[in-house]
């Protein structure tokens, strides 16, 4: 049995990918502790989930987002974590903001789990900003430099693995596919939903505009579940559309997902292409989660997520900013039957292959 430390800079409340992979390691007989960052200082400092110990650290009330305060908070968090993981057999580093630990600890084996192209996020709120472009470039170079020091890399999509290969780094894609689940009945009135972090407003403007074009007799409800830095702004935008029935659920946990899926018939998973990760390979986990419950998704056309969505019959893709096209797709999606044929079993096999190659016991 090996001692494994998993590090993530959110509160893991929950983080499905982090907990899923930690649980797979426990199933192999290892002892896993997730070291998580309790930014809002409102979560249990220690708890056990699915045989995995989660230890949470507090260094002050630290916001999410691309700010100096956030960056300093993450640095303080990693400084507290570093001495706690010196004697483990494997350090599982989730996303680029944990990679500093790869150079601080020389002895344990290190697995870098790249969930996203994190350097693209700093440009999301102001994509034309020269300063943010410079910061993003420095973050990218730093990530690639540190990634060369680890023993193995996994990513959340084939697109991200292709991106790393262009920079001379080999990796294995392990997608965020859940188990296939029983399909709940569809709601009496058709509804389209978004479940996840709300970090920008453009997608919701597009959604509300498209829904308002649909004749009232066919117009779906809109259900938005989740919190995030822009949830207040989206609620404000929603007041401009009194002709749409919009429900905000707020923060939710994964145990609530079956009930939430029963509220919708379609998942909305479109994102502004100003987020560089969209064209480079990001695949929203909500698309897989929706398919697991028999719900089709609407995603960006001309992107890796769009190609995968249509190839596996997981829904429809629409060009960004095509309001009428989105309205048409919402109506068409009511008749799409979706099933997640390739689920987490394939991803578990891929993950185990990487772990076995590490030989860290």
Image (spheres, grey):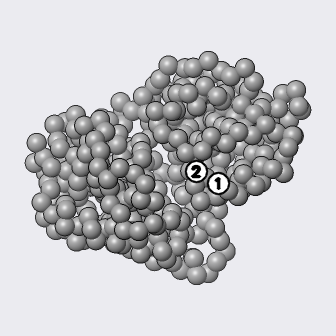
Identify whether 52 is placed above or below 126. above
Check whether the beta carbons of the residues at disc 1 and disc 2 lie within 8 A of each other: yes
Residue 336, numbered circle: none
Q: Secondary structure at mark 2?
A: loop
Residue nearest the observer in this picture, 31 or 214: 31
Cα separation, mark 1 vs mark 2, equals: 6 Å
Report which quarter residue 278 is drawn in. Answer: bottom right
Q: Is residue 242 left or right of 21 when viewed as pictured?
A: right
Q: Secondary structure at mark 1?
A: helix
Identify whether 313 is placed above or below 185. below
Report which quarter residue 286 is drawn in. Answer: top right
* Image location (x, y in percent) of residue 235: 72, 51
Quadrant location of the N terminus in the rendered image: top left
Q: Is residue 95 left or right of 47 when viewed as pictured?
A: right
Residue drawn at x 77%, y 49% is 238
* Image location (x, y in percent) of residue 326: 77, 41
Residue drawn at x 46%, y 67% is 62
């Amino acid at each position: 049995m090996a001692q494994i430390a998993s590090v993530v800079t959110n509160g893991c409340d929950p983080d499905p990918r982090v907990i899923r992979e930690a649980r797979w390691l426990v199933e192999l007989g290892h002892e896993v502790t997730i070291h998580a960052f309790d930014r809002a200082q409102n979560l249990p400092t220690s708890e056990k989930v699915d045989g995995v110990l989660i230890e949470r650290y507090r260094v002050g009330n630290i916001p999410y987002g691309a700010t100096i305060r956030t960056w300093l908070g993450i640095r303080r968090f990693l400084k507290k974590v570093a001495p706690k993981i010196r004697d483990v057999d494997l350090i599982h580093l989730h996303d680029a903001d944990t990679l500093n630990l790869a150079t601080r600890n020389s002895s344990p084996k290190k697995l870098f789990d790249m969930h996203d192209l994190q350097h693209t996020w700093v440009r999301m709120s102001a994509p034309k900003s020269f300063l943010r472009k410079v910061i993003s470039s420095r973050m990218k170079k730093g990530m690639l430099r540190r990634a060369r020091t680890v023993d193995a890399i996994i990513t959340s999509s084939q697109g991200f693995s292709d991106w790393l290969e262009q920079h001379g780094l080999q990796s294995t894609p392990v997608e965020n596919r859940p188990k296939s689940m029983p399909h709940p009945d569809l709601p009496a009135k058709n509804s389209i939903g978004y479940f996840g972090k709300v970090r920008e407003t453009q997608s919701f403007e597009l959604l509300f505009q498209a829904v308002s074009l649909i004749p009232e007799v066919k117009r779906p409800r809109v259900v938005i579940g989740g919190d995030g830095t822009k949830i207040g702004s989206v609620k404000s935008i929603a007041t401009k559309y009194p002709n749409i029935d919009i429900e905000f659920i707020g923060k939710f946990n994964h145990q609530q997902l079956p009930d939430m899926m029963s509220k919708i018939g379609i998942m909305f998973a479109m994102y502004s292409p100003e987020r560089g990760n969209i064209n480079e390979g990001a695949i929203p986990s909500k698309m897989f989660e929706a398919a697991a419950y028999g719900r089709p998704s609407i995603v960006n056309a001309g992107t890796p997520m769009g190609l995968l969505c249509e190839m596996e019959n997981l829904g429809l893709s629409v060009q960004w900013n095509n309001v009428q096209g989105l309205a048409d797709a919402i109506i068409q999606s009511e008749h799409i039957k979706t099933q997640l044929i390739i689920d987490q079993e394939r991803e578990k096999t891929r993950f185990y292959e990487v772990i076995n190659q590490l030989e860290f016991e």
